[in-house]
Image: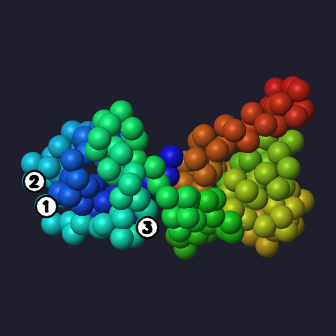
């Protein structure tokens, strides 16, 4: 189900201008009925300006009237509105690594190569956020700073999450069929 553009503002309008139940408003706006009741009591959303979902093209007056007459009916978003609602999508591109953490990447790469030699350069690159050239230079011991690189856990360095590392290791085990 798609939520309205501004759920609390829409809920404030629906509470003030309709005879809908708290459950109906809560379900449409993605809120708990007690939170909607809090709006009705004036305890929640006191400073929020309401947003008219009929004027905004999110609901029709007929749908509201039907739902006021039958408390079992649900408010239905107008189909044309759904194209304007922002859906969360995966962001493409590299993630930002603070300057203070950038010098830790070669150490993390060395740790991954030492502990998981079967991990591909692409997997290491995704995990740590680095280039294949840097990984291959560390693998071949031709990196410009190889004498100062000490293998350190990328999770402890804050370059990846433990879950992400575990998932990558699990995919290696599944693909190779042996313990990693």
Quick one: quadrant of the C terminus?
Answer: top right
Q: Are marks 1 and 2 in contact (CB under 8 Å)?
A: yes
Q: What residue is rendered at 13% in x and 61% in y?
A: 46
Name the residue at 70% across, 53% down.
127
Q: Quadrant of residue 170?
A: top right
Asked which secondary structure carries label 2, the reply is loop
Q: Position of residue 118 (x, y in %)?
A: 87, 42
Indicate how the structure is coloured in the image: rainbow
Q: Residue at x 41, y 59 (%)?
A: 59
Name the residue tied to disc 1.
Answer: 46
Q: CA distance from mark 1 to mark 3?
A: 24 Å
**How would you rate the neighbour count of disc 1 (Cα within 10 Å): few for under 14, some for 14-19, many for 20 or more?**
few
Q: Which residue is mark 2?
A: 42
Q: Answer above or below: position of 153 versus 99.
A: above
Q: Residue 178 in the image: x percent, y percent?
A: 87, 26
82 relative to 72, above or below: below
Which structural element holds mark 1? loop
């Amino acid at each position: 189900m798609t939520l309205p553009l501004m759920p609390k503002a829409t809920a404030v309008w629906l509470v003030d201008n309709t005879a809908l139940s708290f459950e109906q408003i809560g379900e449409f706006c993605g809120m708990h009925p007690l939170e909607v009741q809090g709006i009705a009591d004036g305890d929640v959303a006191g400073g929020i300006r309401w947003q008219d979902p009929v004027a905004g093209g999110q609901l029709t007056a007929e749908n509201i009237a039907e739902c006021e007459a039958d408390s079992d009916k649900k408010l239905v978003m107008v189909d044309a509105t759904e194209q304007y609602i922002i859906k969360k999508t995966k962001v493409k591109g590299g993630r930002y690594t603070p300057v203070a953490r950038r010098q830790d990447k070669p150490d993390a790469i060395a740790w991954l190569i030492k502990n998981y030699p079967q991990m591909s350069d692409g997997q290491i690159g995704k995990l740590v956020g680095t280039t294949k050239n840097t990984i291959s230079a560390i693998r071949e011991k031709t990196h410009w700073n190889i004498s100062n690189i000490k293998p350190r856990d990328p999770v402890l360095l804050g370059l990846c999450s433990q879950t992400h590392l575990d998932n990558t290791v699990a995919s290696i085990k599944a693909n190779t069929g042996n313990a990693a």
